Image: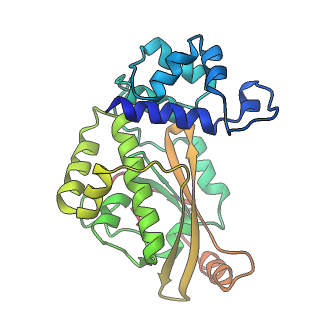
Amino acid sequence: MALQDLGAEVRRLRETTDPAAIGLPPGRRRARGVRREELAELAGVSADHVRRLEQGRRHPSAAVVNAIARALRLGPVEYERLCALAGYAAADGRVPGEAGVSAVRLLERFADTPVFLTDAAWNVVAVNSAWSALGAGASNRRPRDWNIAWRTFSDVHGGISRDDDQARIFRVALASRLRDAVLRYPADEPLAELVDELRTTSRSFDALWRAPRTVGSYDTRAVFRHPGVGDIALDGTMLEVPGDNLQAVVLTAAPGSPDAGRLREVVRASTGPPVVRVGQPGPG
């Protein structure tokens, strides 16, 4: 990756970090986030070093990357991305795809709310009974039926639709997080093959890949077509599951809305197991 990408990421992390969260007094600030001088002092480097780094004019050593990560108190995902942008591959290099005890417990606790777990490559690894009740899962007839990115960019909707704006936002988020995954797990061959296939078969994905956009949060709205109760509009929010390096997508309806009533009706009629482990290449 170009040094400009690394510099832009350092600046983004600095500007989005809450000063109080890393032990700095909030005070009166003309700009958001942490000042360049403050980051430099915490990381043990000069302010000019940080400035040149953010401008894409300096390549940091592994020690400097670690110092910046410690100073900003980065989580595992952001730390791995920063290392990858600097040219330091993730230690393992493969996408974790196992749902541990804590991740499964998360699915169980959201018994009345559709939730599914995916790995960093957007392979669905487990779903809860509320998700299964929506009836929008994959058929398992093709190898990638349980990969959200593949289903989305291949226009395999499976009873799920979005308006043009939501579809665009969703696709940008998928491509952005896949790009992050490639940086974090450079040795994962199935991930590389997925990206190559998407770039070859989907013009929209290739365009997003060549002109990446940074996505800070994942929020999307989709309409699920249920054969029994009709359309259910749900909002999707993604939560990180750091212990397992997975992500959980939680689907909710507006409180008191007809959609909430239809969702409640569908979930109450569910007779499936609390959690279903999908295993491997999901719902789009």
- Residue that appears at 36% across and 74% down: 157
Q: Is residue 262 above or below residue 22?
A: below
Within the image, what quadrant is residue 36 found in?
top right
Q: Is residue 198 above or below residue 9?
A: below
Q: Nearer the viewer, residue 228 or 37?
A: 37
Q: Nearer the viewer, residue 253 or 33?
A: 33
Q: Residue 11 vs residue 258: left or right? A: left
Q: Position of residue 37 (x, y in %)?
A: 64, 20
- Residue that appears at 57% across and 78% down: 233
Within the image, what quadrant is residue 198 found in?
bottom left
- Residue that appears at 81% across and 35% down: 28
Q: Position of residue 162 (x, y in %)?
A: 45, 76
Q: Residue 128 vs residue 149: left or right? A: right
The answer to whether residue 278 shows anywhere in this view is no
Q: Is residue 111 above or below residue 159?
A: above
Please identify the quadrant where the N terminus is shown: top left
Please identify the quadrant where the C terminus is shown: bottom left
Q: Is residue 161 above or below residue 247?
A: below
Q: Residue 266 vs residue 246: left or right? A: right
The answer to whether residue 82 shows anywhere in this view is yes
Q: Nearer the viewer, residue 5 or 174?
A: 5
Q: Nearer the viewer, residue 140 or 209?
A: 209
- Residue that appears at 46% across and 22% down: 52
Q: Position of residue 65 (x, y in %)?
A: 48, 19
Q: Residue 246 vs residue 30: left or right? A: left
Q: Position of residue 204 (x, y in %)?
A: 28, 63
